[in-house]
Image (cartoon, rainbow, N blue to C red):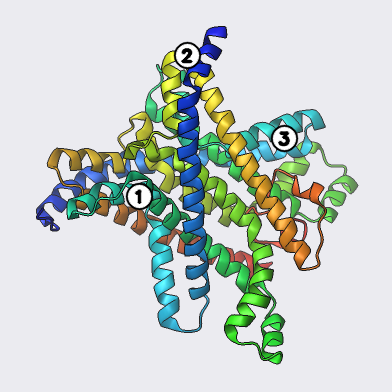
Amino acid sequence: MADNFDALLNALPLILEGLIITLQLTVGGAILAMATAVVLGVLAQQDNILLRGFARVIIEFFRGTSLVVQLFWLFFVLPQFGLSFPAMAVGIAALGLNYGAYGAEIVRGSINSVPAGQWEATTALSLSKLQGMRRVIFPQAWALMIPSLSNLLVHLLKGTAIVSFITMADLTFRIDQLRVDTNTFFAYGVGLVLYFLIAYVLTLAMNALEARAKHKLGRGVSLPEALNLRSADTGVTSSTKEHV
Amino acid sequence: MNVVWEWDKAFEVLPVLLSGFFQVTLLVTVLSTVIAAVLGLVIAIVRRSAPRPIGRVVGFVVDFIRMTPIVVQLLFAYYAFLNVSPIVIGIAVFGIHYSTYMAEVYRAGIDSVPESQWEATTALSMSRYRIWTAVVVPQALRATAPALGNYAISMFKDTPFLLTIGVVEMVQAGLIFGGNNFKYLEAITIAGVIFLLASYPTSLLIGRLEKRLAFSN
C-alpha cells in the first residue's frame, strides 16, 4: 500500500497536468455549449419557420449522431480536407456542439414554460421583443433551466474521458499510466474519486447559481438547500413536477 | 490532397459498419437496457423501503456511479476482470451505469403515485409485496416509460465508448477500415448517419408516447 502512495506521489505532477486538460475541456466545452444552447434554443421557439427549421435541423443532427462520431469526424476526417486543428480545439468543439444541442432543448423548453402572461406584460410595458426576452423572460427561464443544465454539465465532464483517443493526455490517460505503476483498484479508485469530486463541485456551483437566480426573482431558497447533491430534473413528465 | 466522397469505398465499408451495428452496438444497447431497467427499479424500491442507513449507502453508491465517467468505469472493470470477455464487461457496465439514471426516473414515478393509493393498500391490509407489485409499480411505470426510452437512446449513442476496452462496435469498425484505407470520410460519416437514422425516429416515437400519456392524465 505504501508503494502505491509513493507511486501516486511520483505521478502527481502528471496527474495534475491531466486534470488541467480535463478541466479545460470541461470549461471550454461548457462555454461553447451554453452559447450554442442559447442561440439554437431561442431560434427553435421563433414563429418564423425558416429560423425554427434551421435550429431544429442543427439540434437533431448534433443530438442524433453520437458524440464520439462527431469527435472522430472532426479529428480524422477534417484533416483529410486539409483542415487540421489542435486536439484541444477539436475536443472543445465536439463537446460544445454536442452538449449545446441537448442544452438547446432545455433552453427552448424553459422559455416555453414561462407563463404567456409575462410576454403580454412586456407588450403592455411596450418593451421591444429583445428587451422583453433579456429583462423579463430569460431571467425566469434561466432559473427553470439550471437543474437540467447542471445534469448536462456533469454529462459533459464525463464525456471528456474519451479524448485520449484524439491523442490528449487527460485525467483518464494519466490514471491509466498510474495503473501500470500501482494496480487497477488503486489507480482507478483514485481516478473515479477525482472525477466524482469535480462533478460534485460543479453540481454545488450550479445549485448555488440556481439559488441566486431564484433569489433574484424573489423566490428565495436558503443556501443549505443549495448544498443538496441531487438535482430535481429526472425527465419524468407527470404530476411529479409539483413534488420536486 | 484530393479528397472526395468515393461511393465504392462507401459500399465497401457499409457491410462492415452494419455488422458492427447489429452484432455489437444493438446487442449491447438491448441487453444493457434490460439490465438497467430491472436494476434501476430494484434500486428505487430499496431506496424507498429499506432502513435509512442502507438507503443512504445505496444512495451514495448510486450517485457515485452516476457522476463518474462510463469510460473510466469500463476501463476499471476491464482490468479488474481480465478473464471476462470485453463485450460482457461492456454490457454489465452500461447496464449498471444507466440503472443509476433509471432509478431516478422510477423514484419520480413512484412519487407520482397519489398518497391515497398507499392509504388504500393499508385499508385493504395488503402485504408489502402486493403493495409494490399490484398497486405502486404498475401505476409508477406508466409515467416513466418515455424517460426510460430516452435513456435507452442515450445509451445507444454512448456505445462507441466501448472502443476504449477494445470492443469492435460500429464506430471502431469504421476507424479500423479508415486506417487500413487511409480514408476516414465515408466510414465515419456513414456511422454518424446510421446513428441518426436509428435514434431520431425512435425519439420521435417516444415524444408521441409522452404526449399521449400526458394527455390521458
Disc 1 secondary structure class? helix
Q: Which residue is denoted by mark 3 in the rendering?
A: B46
Q: Amino acid at mark 2?
A: Thr
Disc 3 secondary structure class? helix
Same chain shared by disc 2 and disc 1: yes
**Figure quadrant of residue B166:** top left
Work out which quarter of the rendered image holds the C terminus of chain A and state it. bottom right
Q: Position of residue B88 (x, y in %)?
A: 42, 28
Q: Is residue B38 visible?
A: no
**Figure quadrant of residue A240:** bottom right
Lateral position of residue A16 relative to residue A217, left or right = left
Chain of the residue that carries numbered disc 3 in the rendered image: B
**Between disc 2 and disc 1, whose residue precedes?**
1
Q: Position of residue A151 (x, y in %)?
A: 59, 50
Q: Which residue is denoted by mark 1 in the rendering?
A: A90
Same chain shared by disc 3 and disc 1: no
